[in-house]
Amino acid sequence: MHDDHKCNCEQPLVPGIVEVIDIKEETPDIKSFYVKNIDGQGVPFNVLPGQCAMISTPVGEGMFSCTWQEEQEWLQFAIKRVGLMTDDLHRIEVGQQLGIRGPYGNHFPIEESKGKDMLFIAGGIGLAPLRSFIKYCFKHREDYGKIQIIYGSRSYADLCFKDELFDLWPKEKDTEVFVTIDRPEEGWDGEVNFVPTYLEKLNPDPANKMAVTCGPPVMIKFVIQALEKMGYSDEQIITTLEMRMKCGIGKCGRCNIGSQYICLDGPVYNMVQLRQLPPEW
Amino acid sequence: MKILNKSKLEEVLNRLGENADVYVPMSKGLQSGFYPWKSLEGGKDELMLDALNVYQPPKSVVFPQTERMYSLYQEGKGLKIEETYENDEPRVIFGARACDIKGIICMDEVFLTGGYEESFYKARRESTTIVANACYEPGPSCFCAAMGVDPLNPEGADVIIRDTGDAYIWEALTEKGEALSSTIKDLLEEKELSVPEAKPFIQQVDYDGVAEKLKGMFEHPIWDRTSEACLNCGICTYICPSCYCFDIQVKMYGHEGYRFRCWDSCMYEEYTREAGGGNPRPTGRERFRNRFLHKLEFFTERYGHPLCTGCGRCIVVCPAGINITSIISEAKEADLDA
Amino acid sequence: MNDFTQQIQDIASRLLDNGQVDVFIAWHKGQQDFQVQPYFARSADEAQNIIFNDYSIHNLSNSLLKFRDSKEKIGIVVKGCDSRGIIRLLEDNQIQRERLYIVGICCPGMKDPLQAMRDELGFNHKPESTELAAKCNDCIQPNPVIYDELLGTEQSPRVQDRFARVKEIEAMSADERYQFFEETISRCIRCYACREVCVACDCRTCIFDEMRPQWVGRENNTTDNLMYHIVKASHMAGRCIECGECERVCPVNIPLMLLNQKVIKDVNELFGPYEAGMQYVEGQKPPFSMYEESDPDDFL
Ligand code: SF4
Ligand code: SF4
Ligand code: SF4
Ligand code: SF4
Ligand code: FES
């Protein structure tokens, strides 16, 4: 699965260097980093929706899902501040050089989903990986049917990609965007709900549909339950898994769930595959 | 057949040492392991070719506990990697047993297949020649045959030596092995010796069907009981010839530094601890289960044979008396509905 | 010894049967003759698997840490040194006295199953075949210092010169000493078994697992190894109960007790005689475990 888009470098653990050409604050703790080769020519590698890359600073390395690749212009990564390495990343400025290696892992089923209606369900930073698939669908609009996006976060401030959520995406052809926040707040007259409950309330019809979900593990669990209740089959439910990663190439051992290495064989799985795995996700 | 008289052994090792680092099984004080032949101190250290296994397997010759990967240099907003440290100096592992070499084969599969060839391992591995020592008398903790290893004809050997008492039968099997033999041509003799008689195994282990059976045992109560005594100390993983998990870390002195990798162990809490603090394997039980399932089920699913080569080391060193052969037999006998 | 086995089995069955304890920690037989394993019996039936023999050397008090967050009532067998471990845990509020039923054994000295294993299996070229485990030859406290029930008859301490090894090192020149430690400590493979087995290492998050910041580097070299050992030894000040388990389990024979005993000797010389975990007085804290505003702190 990972053969068409893989790094063919001779030294897979040694990163190449890219430069940060833009930084955008998405939420108080999520920033988007746009990177490009240091000679200004193109991107270090091509990524498919759902694939990841290992980004490094002198503090550490971290695996991040690529939020979007704009042709040969740049790669975008929306990154949440959670630990030592991401703290460091959040401090850098435009012009900073970073290490990068990849692309790693498999990708969303862009082929298998052709001709289907798409249902994207995300929570918090979980929209970052899904966004690459969403934007891919818009770019190849004629290949996909109706697009529905359900997205929620703790608060309005914590919603990522607001301009797209509220302005751009709803204007796309045959597209609906449903946004919710966890707790009521002043100035918000939209939905206040947890993502899984909102999903059940909207009750989107499973016919000819692919449901793709990403978010905090608990949310994913309840979303999957809700989808099953609504009659989605295992083949129709797609999600991405997260484990701690170090090598990214199926060598260092730590990201295993059963005999699968999430960095190499994942992170994208459908429910049929997930049911084969030990329940450690 | 070619034979190597034991009286010439030292000379052979010295000769091999002219062109390569030679690692031999050796005791150093209370320790034993594969150490450089050059480091042998007379009167203190002792060559241990006749012992079955030494404490430290030769794993670290191809996969050192700590290995620098590349330099890092930071200047203003710039970041540079000027040097990478692949090490391809010639080395010889002399006198390794089949189980330990199988451990290296397991690492070959991990590091050199599966879509990526890891360059640091590759450099060391390709520059290493292995002289295997066939085992005719398995020790009390040996169970390699049960794990698919042939102690008489070690897989992965470039040369096999067979101990006949006063001399070794010397048999080169690969190009690397031939090349090595040619450097000591004058020290080998031509003579017919009969191979010793192979003694039976003391340990009886039956791994047949265990990998498949374990598939249905992830949540089986056997893990509660078997893991209870385990300290999650990780000795078993560090001392195992086939355990290969590693961590990647960085050391910076101001603007300069390097990234290195070092052994890690699935027995440790920190191993799967996520940046946000969560951990999919929060207690010793899950970590214990992962170690044994990885050895006996997951690796077999991926590579077609277990990640345990039956060397028996973990049985010897475990402070809690955990025994992988008992785990195999408990799994074999376990009631799946329990 | 068989005698002890029977007695412990009886006590364990009694306690498990009448619900006085939920789990009883002792030993059971491993695969080889000399292999015994810590064992957690949960029923009177299981109590029949318990054994106590020459090789029941493990300091079980350490396994109480597995129960520090549960409510279970626990029966446990301790020898002299192990019993001091229980006091350590009580002093650090890791476990409550009322949850414990302690069976003490006046210890005749044990053999080391790890040593026996190495000898038997040929990992050692020169089997040592000592009678008693090294740590038992150095024993200062064979008789339990805390118990609910005591088995056996009182034993006398076996130690001859408690700080003999320390004095040897102290007598070296600074260079010799450095060389000695460099040589010894560079062997360490940093598995941290010495920490895991230690009852005094009861911190929930150990400094060596702390990543933010990472106090001690993970490289396996003399500097990082020395750092590990110096930090560990100093954390043992006033805490090490001299059960010798760290040194016994170390796969590369690092003389950990040498460092611990040096610290014990220094604490004794600098702060007056003190033996960790010898006596349980509710509310009393060992040195270095408390801080008062009047403490001199001019070193900070
Ligand atoms: S396990 Fe097999 S190969 Fe290894 S030392 Fe024993 S008999 Fe030899
Ligand atoms: S099995 Fe034994 S050696 Fe391995 S971690 Fe557990 S106690 Fe340590
Ligand atoms: S698991 Fe144990 S017996 Fe198997 S190869 Fe590793 S150390 Fe040897
Ligand atoms: S001293 Fe021994 S037990 Fe402790 S970390 Fe080092 S090798 Fe492991
Ligand atoms: S991150 Fe190393 S195996 Fe997946």
Image (cartoon, coloured by chain):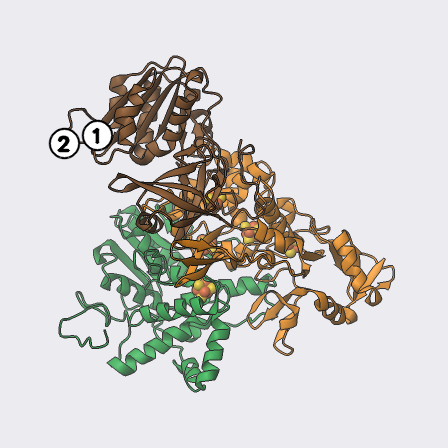
> What is the letter of the brown chain?
A
Q: In this view, does C77 lie to the left or right of A17?
A: left
Q: Colour of chain C?
A: green
Where B42 falls versus B312 (above or below)?
A: below
Q: Chain B is drawn in which colour?
A: orange
Viewer-proximal residue, C238 or C207? Answer: C207
Q: Quadrant of residue C159?
A: bottom left
**Tag 1 residue:** A181
- The amino acid type of the residue labelled 2 equals Glu
Mark 2 neighbour class, 10 Å CA radius: few under 14, some 14 to 19, many 20 or more: few
**Tag 2 residue:** A185
| Badge 1 vs badge 2, beta-carbon distance below 8 Å | yes
Chain that bears disc 1:
A
Q: Distance between the residues labelled 1 and 2?
A: 9 Å
Viewer-proximal residue, B243 or B68? Answer: B68
Where A279 falls versus C61 (above or below)?
A: above
Mark 1 neighbour class, 10 Å CA radius: few under 14, some 14 to 19, many 20 or more: many
Q: Could you tell me which residue is drawn at 48 percent across and 83 percent down? A: C176
